[in-house]
Amino acid sequence: MTIQLYDLAGQDDDCRFSPHCWRVKMALAHKGLAFEALPWRFTEKDAIAESGQGQVPVLRDGDRLVHESWQIADYLDEAYPERPPLFEGPQARAHALMIRHWAQRSLHPAVVQVIMPELFEALHEKDKPYFRESREALFGKTLEAFAGDRDEKLANLGKALAPLRDTVKLQPYLGGEAPSFADFIVFGAFQWARAVCPVALVAEDDPVHAWRGRLMEAYDGLAAKAKGFPV
Amino acid sequence: MTIQLYDLAGQDDDCRFSPHCWRVKMALAHKGLAFEALPWRFTEKDAIAESGQGQVPVLRDGDRLVHESWQIADYLDEAYPERPPLFEGPQARAHALMIRHWAQRSLHPAVVQVIMPELFEALHEKDKPYFRESREALFGKTLEAFAGDRDEKLANLGKALAPLRDTVKLQPYLGGEAPSFADFIVFGAFQWARAVCPVALVAEDDPVHAWRGRLMEAYDGLAAKAKGFPV
C-alpha cells in the first residue's frame, strides 16, 4: 500500500502550507518513496486520533503510524536503509538537531511575523476559530496585532537568515553537496510562506534564494509544482 | 616536533581568551595531539607573517603552517585520520558549518555585548589602541557604548542561546553522544567570557550550563584548568 501522509490544507484542498509537513514530503521524495498526501484540517482531530495526538504530519506506512517530522525522518531512515539517507550518520543527525531548533526558535517566528495576515485568510473556515484561539494564546497577542510594517518584518527575517545565508554561500545545501533532512527542515518554512503569501521573503540576489530554488526544483520539482505564489 | 599554536593572550600570559583559539585547543585535545600554545598579541603580526595573514589561531605542525580554526579542523582530520575525528563525515561537517555561522552571527555578538568592558581591560597594553580602533570600526560604536544594563544583555544572550539549550536538553553534545568540532566552536565563546569576565553567562540550572560543564571537564579538564573566573 502507498504511504499516506496527513497533510495540513487550507480552504482550498491544494493549499498545503504546513512547514512541518513539507519537511516530510521532501524527505519522502529524497528517499524516492511514493506517497499520497491527504488533505487534513486542524479541527479534524478524529482522523488522526489513532496516532495518539492531534497534529500533523502523521504518516501511515502499512501498519505503522508515525507522527512528528523528526520522528518520521528517523523512521524512514530505519525502515528504508537501502534508499538515500536523510542523515548520513549519528553525528550528522545530532548536528541537524541544532539546525532544527534554530529553525523553530529563530526562523519560524520571523516568518510568521511576515505571513500571518495571509496565513489566517488561507485557512479553512472551520479551522479559523481554533487557529485564532490557539495562536493568540501561543503568541500572547491578537492575530490583528501581526499587521504592521512589513518592510521592518522582512528586515528582521533577513537578519534571522544570516547563518543560513553564510552557509549556502559556501556550499550548495546545508547537507553539503546534496540535500539532507536539515535542508528540508529549513526549506519547509519557505514553502509555508509561498503557499499562502505573495510576498517574497528574500531578494533574488540573496544566496538563500538560490538555495531555495535548488530545493524547489529537486525531485522533479515537487515543491515548485505545489500550488503557491510565484515568489 | 610538538605542534605549536599561536594563541591570543592578554596582559597576563596565562589569560587565553580567544574563542577561535579555544576551538583549536579543544580539537587538538579531542584528537589526543600534544601541543604548545604560544602566547601571542594582536599587534605581533610579524610572528605569524609566514601564514600570509595577521590573525590567530595559526598552527605549526612540522613544516605545515595552517591558519583559521575551520581550516585547522580540516587539516587535523586529514593529517591524523587514525585519531578521533572532528567530523564523522561530509554531511556532519556540512551541518557543522551552519552551527559555525550561527555562533558567529547570533552567539558571539550577544556574548561580546556582555563581556566587552572586562575584555578590553584584560588586553595587553600594547594591544589596546589596535583593539579599540578595529572593534569600534567593526561595531560602529565606541567601546564605552558597550557599557549599560548587563541584566538586559544577559537576557538577550539567554534568548540567543535558545537553539543550543533546546538541543542539549535532548543529547549531551551538539555532536550527539560525544563532542564534535561543532561543540568546540560554540564552547569557545564560553571560554572567551570565562577568561576575562566574572559574570556567569547562564544560570546553574540551565541545560547549557551542564553542557558547558561536560566540555570544561573533558580531556583531563583542559578548559577547566585554564586561567579564568570560577563561573
Image: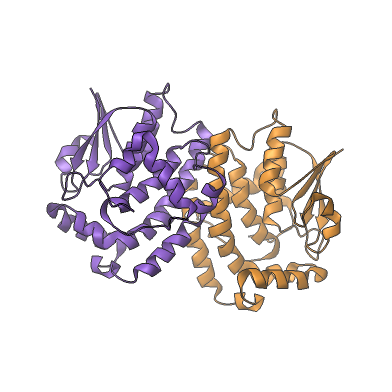
Chain colours: A purple, B orange
User: In the picture provided, is B197 more to the left or to the right than A155?
Assistant: right
Count of marks overlaid on the render: 0
Q: Quadrant of residue A132?
A: bottom left
Q: Residue at x 42, y 23 (%)?
A: A81
User: In the picture provided, is B48 more to the left or to the right than A27?
Assistant: right
Q: Quadrant of residue A182?
A: top left
Residue A161 location (% of width, % of height)? 46, 56
Above or below, comparing residue A48 to residue B140 in the picture: above
Q: Nearer the viewer, residue A198 or A165?
A: A198
Residue A164 location (% of width, % of height)? 49, 51
On-image quarter of the N terminus of chain B: top right
User: In the picture provided, is A28 more to the left or to the right than A166?
Assistant: left
On-image quarter of the C terminus of chain B: bottom right
Residue A53: in sight, yes or no?
A: no
Residue B223 location (% of width, % of height)? 69, 50
Residue B225 location (% of width, % of height)? 73, 51
Above or below, comparing residue A140 to residue B71 in the picture: below
